[in-house]
Every structure is written in structure tokens, then in C-alpha cells.
Image (spheres, grey):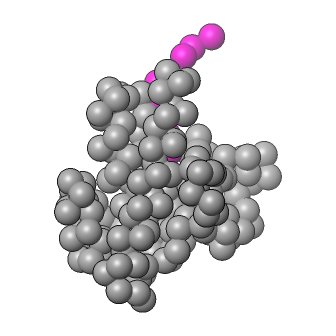
Amino acid sequence: MARKEKTRILFVCSGNICRSPAAEGIALHHFALYGLERKIEVDSAGLQGRYHARQAPDPRMLQAAAARGYDLGKLRARGLETADYERFDLILGMDESHIEAMKKACPAPLRPRLKLLLDFAPETGAREVPDPYYGTQQAFEAALDLIEQGVIGLVRESTERA
């Protein structure tokens, strides 16, 4: 039996300019810290990503992430594509509305791949990462706090499997 080259993880939010690129950048950072960058591929997409296609993350998210040591500057928004359901092993939505929208488009046999990011951080007591887009800089900080915890939980689980 051939061994799979990489596990592929996709982070999804509404526009792919705030939460999901932050999750991608944080995951890239943490997977590299644990030497898993050759075993795990990460990407991000937005349900309405075509609206923001090829845009950099929101400047407020760039600033908040940079203050924590995460470089999101090279990331660009893209829309979620039908092929992503097949291509990615795990597709993590930031909130329940993302999961519901993806369930409608995702072939039934692949729906077990859909999860919330915060399923990997039950200690937070939260299920969803709130959208900071219409909020203050504090909203971006709060979103990053949750995203970091979700990603760290995901990395923890991934290192246990590696």
C-alpha cells in the first residue's frame, strides 16, 4: 500500500482575508516549528473568495499577526472550489455558517472532512471564531487568540499521529 505524501488541510472563512489566512499563516509557522512542513500542506479559501480574489489579508489582520511573529504578507485570497473537497483531507471552517454552506456543496461521502477549527481547542469553551472584519483592532486580537489555540490543538493532534 502506497503511503500518502502529505496531509492537506484547508482553512475556510467568508472572504479569505481575515480568519482563514491567519489560520494558514499560524499553521505554517507552527508546523514548521515541529518539522511537519513536509508532511502537512496548508491553504486557505473563502466562501466569497472570488470577491476578494488575489487580495492580501486585511491590513488589520496583517498588523495583529505580525505583532505575534506571523508573516501573512505573501498570502492571497482565493475562493473555495468544488475540487477542494476532494483535494483536502481536512477542511476547517471558522464558524457554523461556513460548515453549513460547505455541507451543501460537498459530496456526501466527503462531509466527514468538514470540521470547525475550534474542535481542536475544546479548552476555549468556544465553537466559533467570530468574524473581526466589522470590529475594532481588539476583535482581530480576540480572533487571533482563538485561531492560535485551534491551530496549536491541530498541531498537537498532528504530532501525535506523525
| Image height of 68 relative to 41, above or below | below
| Image height of 63 relative to 149, above or below | below
Which region shows up in magenta? Answer: 1-10
Is 68 a magenta residue? Answer: no
Percent across and percent down for residue 147 are 45, 58
| Image height of 36 relative to 52, above or below | above
Identify the residue at image location x=51%, y=43%: 153
Instruction: Kindly report the secondary structure that dominates the magenta region of the rendered protein.
Output: loop
Identify the residue at image location x=73%, y=51%: 111
Q: Is residue 55 visible?
A: no
Would you say 133 lies left or right of 32 here? Answer: right
Is 3 a magenta residue? Answer: yes
Q: Which residue in the rendered view is the most extreme toward the top?
A: 1
Percent across and percent down for residue 22 are 36, 61
Identify the residue at image location x=66%, y=73%: 97
Quarter of the picture holding the N terminus: top right
Percent across and percent down for residue 56 are 26, 70
Percent across and percent down for residue 102 are 66, 64
* Res. 59 image quadrant: bottom left
* Res. 101 image quadrant: bottom right
Would you say 28 lies left or right of 103 here? Answer: left
